[in-house]
Each structure stands twice: as C-alpha cells, then as structure tokens.
Amino acid sequence: MNNPLLRGLTQSRYSRRDALRFAGYSAAGLALAACGVQGQKAAAPSPSAVADFWSTQKKNGRVVFANWPEYMPEDQAPLKQFQQATGISYEYKEVIQENAEFFGKSEPQLRAGQPLGYDIIVMTNGLQLGKMIQLGYLTALDHKQLPNFAANAGASYKNPAYDANNTYTIPYQAGVTGIAYNTKYVDEDITSIQSLFDKKYEGKVGMMADAQEVGNFGMFAVGVDPDKSTQADWEKAAAKLKEQRDQGIVRKYYAQDYIDAVAKGDVWLSQAWSGDVFQRQLAGEPVKFVVPQEGGTIWIDNMAIPKGAANPVDALMLMDFLYKPEIAAELTAYIQYVTPVNGVQQILAGKSDEDSKALAESSLIFPTEADYAKLRPYRTLTNAEEPVYNGLFQTITQG
Amino acid sequence: MRRWTPYWLALPAWLWLAIFLVVPIAAMASVSLTTGNLIDGFTQTFSVSNYSDAIAKYSTQLVRSLVYGGVATVIMLVLGYPVAYWIAFKAGHRKSMFLFLLLLPFFVSFVLRTISWGFLLADDGILLGTLKGWGVLPQDFHVLATTVAVIGGLVYNFLPFMILPIYVALERVDPRVIEASYDLYASRLSTFRRVVLPLSLPGVFAGVLMTFVPATADPINAQVLGGTSNTMIGNIVQTEYLVNNDYPTASAISFTLMAVLLIGIFIYARALGTENVLEAAAR
C-alpha cells in the first residue's frame, strides 16, 4: 500500500479533532443555558495569594500531561525518566489539536469552575492563551520550584510580552513560520515572500487559514513588522492578500494539512511551520523550508497549569524536569522544533549519530542571533482589536 | 396501572430529547439575542441586529451552502433511485448483501472517507496523475479545491441516506399491485410513473430530508476538499464559535440556517403535493 494513503488512514488527527469540536459545541451550549454569560475577567493574583496557594499544595505522586500530537518521542523516554527520578506516575494525552478548538472546548468547563482533568496543558502564544490568562483560567506558577527553568531557559524565552515574568507559563517548544516548497516542482531557490504572490505559481500556493499567520505574511509582503503594526497596516496587508486570492494564486487556505499538499504536489509552495518540514525531509520527501528575507514569525508553545488542576506540585516538577538540557535534547531530537533550553545544541553536537549532528548544525532548530533578528513575534491583540483584525483577514480566508 | 405503561416506557426518550435537544436550543436562542464579548461577558439585550448583521455578512456562504446542498441532493436522487429500485426488485436473494455493501463505508469514519478522496484525487495522485500521464488531461487540470470536489464529496458521503429510505418504500410495494397494472394494459413506463413512483414518494421525501439538511450544514467536505471560494455556512459557524468566540453571531447563524431549512422543507412538502407526506413517511 502506498505510504501517504496509509498515513492518511492511520492518522487520527481529523477524526479526533472533530470529535472534540462537536463535544465543544454541545458542552458550550449547555453552559450557556442561563440568560447571558457572565464575564470572568480576573485581575492578576497578588504575590502573597500565589505564595499562600502553593504553601498548601502537596506532591500527589501523579500528573496528567495534555499535549499536541507528535510532540513527545514515541517511547516517552523523557517522561519515563521523570517517573524514575521522582516516583511520580504520569498520564500523557495527545488531546490538543488546535488552540482555538481546545480553548472552545475547555472554556465552558473552566468557566463553570470544573477541573479539566489535566495538570499541564500546552498552548501557543496567541489569542486563546491571552484569553486564558485574562479570564483567570491558569494557575500562577511558583518560580521557587522551577530552578532548572531559571538556570537553563534561553534569554529570549524569559519574560515574554504575552506573559510578563512567566507568571503563568513557561515555553515547551518554539517554532518558525516560513515557506515550504517542493523542489520537484519549484526549480528556483525561494528566498523572498514575494514568491507566494508570484503569478507564475498561480493556483499552486498554499496559505494558512489562521488569521494571525496569514495576516503576518501579508504584512511582511507590504514591508510592515507585524509586531508594531497598526490597523492601517492590517488593511494594507489585507488588500495585498485579497489581490493574491482574487488573482487565483492561492489554491487553498489550510488549517494544518498543508504539508501533505506540498509533499503530494497539490501546492508547490506554502506557508509552513519549520518542524513539519524537517519531519518530511527525514522521511526523504523533496521539501525545503526557508525563512523569507523579509521576515518570518516565531511562535512559542507554552506549558501552563489550568485552574483547578489536581496535582499542581507534580506538574511544576515535570515542567522543570523538561528544562534539564539532556532531557530537552531528547525532545529536540524527536520533535525538531526550536528548543527554549540552553545547552541542547552542545549535547546533540557531541552525539555520535549523523541525525543528531545534522540537527545541531541546523540554523532553523538553533537560530543564530542574526536569525532571531529576522524572526518577529505575533502581535498581541487587545480585546477591542481582535474582532477588527479577525474580520479583515477572515473575509479573505473564508470568502 | 397498565394504561400508563406506554407513557412510562416512553419517558426516558422524552427526557433525553428535552434535556439534550430542547435545552440547548433554548440556550442558543437566548445567546443569539445577547451582545458582548467573551472577556467582559455577554448580556441579554434582545438585540435582533445579531441576525441582520450575520445575514448581511455571510449571505454569500449561506446561499452557497443551500445551492451545494440542493445540487448534491438532486444528484443523489438521480443516482440513488435506480440503485434502490434495482436492490428492491432485481437483487433477488442477494438483497441483504447489497444493503450491507451500501452500509460498508460507514465502518470508516466520515472524516477519513473524505480525506481518502483527497488522496485519490490529488493533482498528481493515482487517478489524475495516471490520466495526465496518458495525455487524457492537461497538466494543470485539478479536481481538489474546486466546487465539483465539494459537491462530489457531499454526494459520496450522504448517498446511502438517500438510497435506504427509497429502498424501504419500494420494498413495501405489493407486487400484485404492479401485476394489476400490467393486467390493465399499462406499459412498463406508465406502471412506473403511475404506480411505483407515487408509492415510493414517502421514501423520496424522507431521503431528501435526510440528505439535504446535513449536506447543507456540513463543514468537513468544504474544509478538506474545497478551495478559496467554497466556504460553507458550517465552516462559518465553527469559526465564529470556536475561533472568534462570538457566541451570539454563531447562534444567530445557526438559527437562520435552521429557519431557512425548515421553510424550504415545508415548501417542498407542499410542492410534492402530498400534504400528509409526513404521515405517509411515518407509516
């Protein structure tokens, strides 16, 4: 049997995502049964309240970790080592498929004050994580219990704009949004974002459906730094993207199935996440990844403890354990995204196998200072800006 | 006491419907008349502008969904009726096997079936790639990311729901009635037109109901097989609900769709001329 078909049939990605989606609908429907919905906007808790909370918590000997698919080595070695080192048993669940879906499903439960049943969740810095923080759905972390994070986290991963002082989150992995292309069909070296807008590739360009992702690339194309953008810039970017769409250059706005389309040749080049492309390269498929000279975006997937988690101390211990460089190196070797932990590059470079050495030399897994300068973070949108921003770009992706 | 037994037995089902159908619908109706956002909360303002705004903003996708659903339903009827007829009258003792074959795809999840279409119809996949290799199709020909792919996917996914009710109706047609028609010198065509077809109409009605409604509201086919201009109303509801967390707009669109579908079905029932068609379908 052909490989892509086998993968298509064995991947549970879609079915599970849709099951969650519909579970979300019905759960939300019931939670909204009362007239109107109370806002839950929560002020940040005082340091003493945080200290009080943590002083009453005890290690329970178990932890439940909710994560994305393909975000942990299949043998779960890092988690097993954690269990050996601490005696804490773990449950690992690949239940998060998309930030919006996960948030949509969890929100009614959290609003009702019910625990999610997870001690650690992983969410990308973006609208939904911002809402989790604003609504008080996350537990403020006790940094006294995160010594490895303090010692080993890379400077650019501490005190991020979306979560000052890492009050609620610490990074799990980071990644880059750039351009992936199929070298079987594209016979030039793609370097510029303008290739995505090139009439030459009419009907062969994939863009992402996510408003922030697609908006960012629109802004790069019109020479605007998304992080510093204004509404006027968004409108300019939207006009550029609309033109790209109306000229028939875009074939489709993808959720996360773009990489299959690139590998199959349905699209020749597409907006893409770095790690997806590396995994395909290792599988021997003719795909290449590039950060356009105009800029790419860097995003961070963060670990957090949801409100009402049963085992917060155990969760903190696991989060900190993943900041040991040798453990983080094992994660990087499998996941192939950007690690927030210092020292991983040296460990991989010191390994004897070729794959590890190749990873250690890749500037996309270990971006240099110059690379970081080219990478821009997502714009943090205020509650008033969000509908304006989404409205502008969703009319393009969902026309 | 015995008099009440049927009521007691029916009670769990009624409770089930009350809790899981009536309550959510009432909640949605209430939410569709609120204003606000997730962070500050939604307040009950009874503002109907949610409806007019949503319809103004998404009329394209709403109309498109109705057209796709309608076209898909007509295709399913044209494809499905002969199949149902053939199984009912010609399949003989193999009937149950064909019915099983009809249901076989349902052992695979809906979404995976749709994805496997994406695999089959890939631009350079096993079907189009081969035809292009033979020079039958031009190099830039593609099916995915087009309207044809979305409607095709809808037809494929919902076709059994059209065939089965028609089959059930045809199966119930008494062969002696057909014989009587021949005895009265009716031709095969007029026997079909004046005897078999009218007797199968309740099945057709049920089939159309069971395919048109879900096909119109379906988001999966547009998402997996569609392109830049194939967004259907189901996709919009998903985005408004889960991405934008704009619960009022999402609820308003859902209700609008429900209302449009109900009106459409009512008109269709009348147009079919059988005013008691629901009764007939329930027989």
Image (cartoon, grey):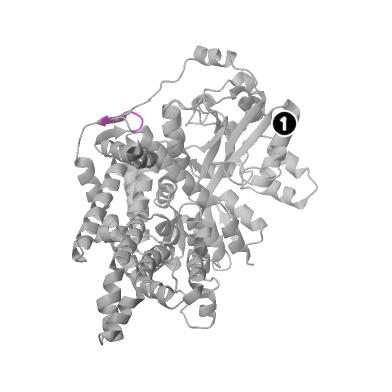
Q: Amino acid at mark 1?
A: Gln
Helix, strand or loop for disc 1: helix
| Crowd class of label 1 (few under 14; some 14 to 19; many from 20; radius 10 Å) | some
Q: Is residue A354 magenta?
A: no
Residue found at x 37% / y 53%: A397
- Between B256 and A134, the one lying in front of the other is B256
Q: Quadrant of the C terminus of chain A?
A: bottom left
Quarter residue A89 falls in: top right
Residue designated by label 1: A83
Q: Quadrant of the N terminus of chain A?
A: bottom right
**Is the residue A250 above or below the residue B131 in the image?**
above
Q: x, y percentage for residue B89?
A: 41, 76
Residue found at x 52% / y 41%: A299
**Is the residue A144 above or below the residue B44 in the image?**
above
Q: x, y percentage for residue A375?
A: 52, 43
Q: x, y percentage for residue A139?
A: 51, 24
Question: Which span is picked out in magenta?
Answer: B38-43
Residue found at x 63% / y 62%: A285
- Between A318 and A222, the one lying in front of the other is A318
